[in-house]
Amino acid sequence: MSPIVQCSCLLLLCLTAIDQCHGGAQGAQSCMDRHQMVGVLRQMEKFLKGQEVRFTEGLRITKSKLAALQNSVSKFPQADQYMAPSTCPALDAPANGKKFGSKHLVGHEVHFTCNTGYHLVGLATRLCQENGSWSGVNTVCKDVSECASNPCQNGGTCVEGINQYKCTCPQNWSGSHCQHQTQTAPPEWSVMNDPAFSRKPRCAKVDHAQHCSCDAGFHMSGTSDNSICQDVNECEVYKLDRGVKLCVHTCVNVPGSYHCSCPSGYKLLPDGRSCEDVDECLSQQHNCTRGTTCINTGGSFQCVNPECPRSHGNISYVKTSSFQCERNPCPMESRSCHLAPKTVSFHYLSLPSSLQTPATLFRMATAAAPGRPGPDSLRSGIVGGNAKGMFVMQRSDRQTGELILVQSLRGPQDVAVDVDMSEYTDRTFQAKHVAKVHVLVSPYEF
């Protein structure tokens, strides 16, 4: 029997005994003795106190266990998992694209763009949401398909390449976009009369129908029953369609392709289209004899042996180097000798045809002997040659003059110009120097 049931029975017994005692004589015969009643009540009091102590102790133990349990749970790593997040994970810029925005807090946005040649797949803007995740899906930058615009006409098949595409045309159609219907008269960019520039087409049956195609560099020609692959003259196609030369000098068509060539005296550069002059003098590919000097020109060379001015009167010259003559000392009384050029130098310049002007070609400068002051002014000008109006001479600073080409020259031609420069100190003439410049213009613009 539980303590609560026991307590209820004792309490019911006491209440019954009290009612009997108040019920008269008949009740008095069965009325409990007063001492018995007091004993029962005291027993109930003790019982209730014991139950109260037990209940209080149990409540205390239960509270203690609850506090310990809460403390233990708060130390779990997952304790904060139900707290609302305040940031989103970092986002990287997509490959071949850029990201704008560095904050990852709730409510902030990041934006994406793609580099040229790529298009955006996904959202251009993503928002950091309250649940700690970004809106939308991952953004990527995909290569712009050259075939996406369907450039091939009349049933042609577009084949992707590196930054370009090629159309494989069906029978009876040709051209870069399958835009030309095969005609009896061949197009001007097609090679028709040379068997070396023809190929048989590759044909296969697909769904009971025959489909034929040509190799790269060829186009389909003829009728559906008698077709042939004719070479495409890339040199003509490029010139007609785009107005820009494939080659700097000469484009040579070959079956299915082309190659570039350079004129004599030039070599083809690794890019396959540009030409560079061969320096015959440097590579010892010249036939200059002893006593002459090899001068490289555009596509060729020259053997030169410049001579000093002839002696006359008291004026004479001696050759001090292959390209320099100096005047012998003058008699003190000879004014004409002092006015004659003190030095005569020779210069050879190789220029491409149609050089952009104005262009500085040559500079003359004064020089003083060690320990002696130089001239304080100079005067320069053009004094001879066969290039009237093509050059001007001007001073770039106090002791330097420049020869400037002002009219474009077309080659091949040799142009000569004589330039003098006079030195003055305190407005008194000191000396004159002459430079004989030979401009060798190439017939080519490279």
Image (tube, helix red, strand yellow):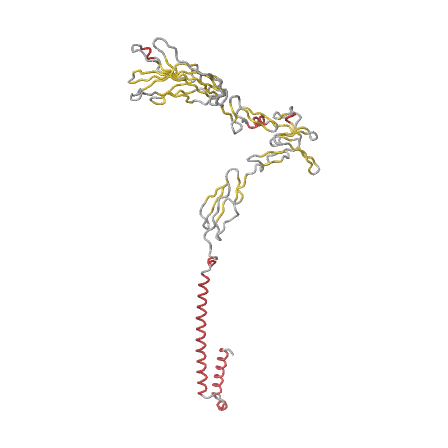
Say which of 38 and 184 sits in front.
184
Say which of 419 and 301 sits in front.
301
Q: How many marks?
A: 0
User: Which residue of the protein is positioned furthest toward the front in this rendering?
Assistant: 290
Q: Is residue 61 above or below residue 224?
A: below
Say which of 31 and 110 sits in front.
110
Q: Is residue 376 left or right of residue 176?
A: left
- Residue drawn at the location 54% of the way across and 39% of the way down: 143
Indicate the position of residue 409 as horizontal and vertical percent values: 46, 19
Indicate the position of residue 11 as horizontal and vertical percent values: 48, 81
Indicate the position of residue 344 as horizontal and vertical percent values: 38, 16
Q: Is residue 225 left or right of residue 277?
A: right
Q: Is residue 190 left or right of residue 412?
A: right
Q: Quadrant of residue 327?
A: top left
